[in-house]
Image (tube, rainbow, N blue to C red):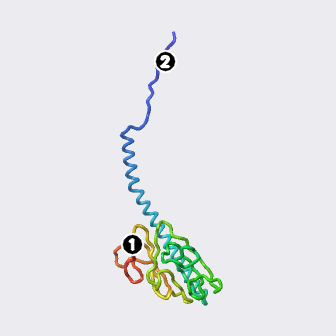
Amino acid sequence: MKKLNKPSKSYTRGFTIIELMVTLAVLSIVLGVGVPAFQNLIEGGRVTSQINQTIGLVSFARSEASKRTATTITVCGSTDEATCNTTNWESGWLVMSDVDGDRTLDAGDGDVLLRVGPALTGGNTLRTLGFGNAGFIQFDAAGSPGSAGTFTLCDDRGATEAKALVLSIVGQSRAAVDEDSNSIVNNHTGGDVTCP
C-alpha cells in the first residue's frame, strides 16, 4: 500500500497593515522634520560660499591696486562679463585695471580685464551700500576704495540670515557681525543690513 503525503502547512511571512501604517507615520515625521533642516543647511552653505567669493574678490582687487601703482582697479557689477552696467552685483561682476578710471574696458588706454565673476545661484542678491556709488568700487594705488561701504548678501530667508562684508575707507575688510544682538549683522555705519 502506498502512503499518501500530507500537504505541509505553509505560512507566509510579511507585515501587517498596522505595522505598515506605523512605519509610514514614522517615515513621514522624519521627512517632515529632516527635509526643511537639510534645506536650511544647503541655503546656509550657499550664502557662506558666496560671501567667501566676495571676500576673495575684494582682496584680489585691493592686492592688484597695490601691485599696479600707476593705475586704478575698478570692481563693478556686470551682466555681460565685459562692461560695468548694473548695480545688482548678483548678476555678475568684473575686476579690471582701469588706467583712466572711466569704468570702461579700453584696450587702447591699456586697460586689462583681470577677473570675471559669474552670476550668483539660488536667487541670492548681492548689493552694496556706501562707496559713493552702488555699481562700482575703485581702488587707488594705496588699496583704498575712497569711502567705506558694505557688500550685503541675502537669500530668500531675509536679513536675519544675511551675511555682509564691511570695507573701511582705507580698504581693510572684515566680516560683518551683529553688534546689537538682534540677529541681524550690521553694515559699515552700524545699522542693520537690509535685503531687497
Above-or-below relation of 40 to 184: above
Residue sitting nearer the eye, 45 or 192? 192
Picture quarter containing residue 116?
bottom right
Left or right: 159 as drawn, with respect to 4: left
Above-or-below relation of 34 to 149: above
Residue 159: image tag: 1
Residue 117 in picture, x, y percent from top left: 56, 73
Mark 2 crowdedness (10 Å alpha carbons): few <14, some 14-19, many ≥20: few
What residue appears at the point 47 percent right and 70 percent down from the top-left corner? 48
Badge 2 marks a residue whose secondary structure is loop
Kindly identify which residue carries mark 2: 5
What residue appears at the point 44 percent right and 76 percent down from the top-left corner? 152
Residue 161 in picture, x, y percent from top left: 40, 70
What residue appears at the point 47 percent right and 83 percent down from the top-left corner? 133
Above-or-below relation of 83 to 122: below
Distance Cα–Cα, label 1 vs label 2: 79 Å
Q: Mark 1 near mark 2, Cβ–Cβ under 8 Å? A: no
Badge 1 marks a residue whose secondary structure is helix
Q: Disc 2 marks which amino acid?
A: Asn
Residue 138 in picture, x, y percent from top left: 53, 85
Mark 1 crowdedness (10 Å alpha carbons): few <14, some 14-19, many ≥20: some
Quarter of the image with the C terminus is bottom left
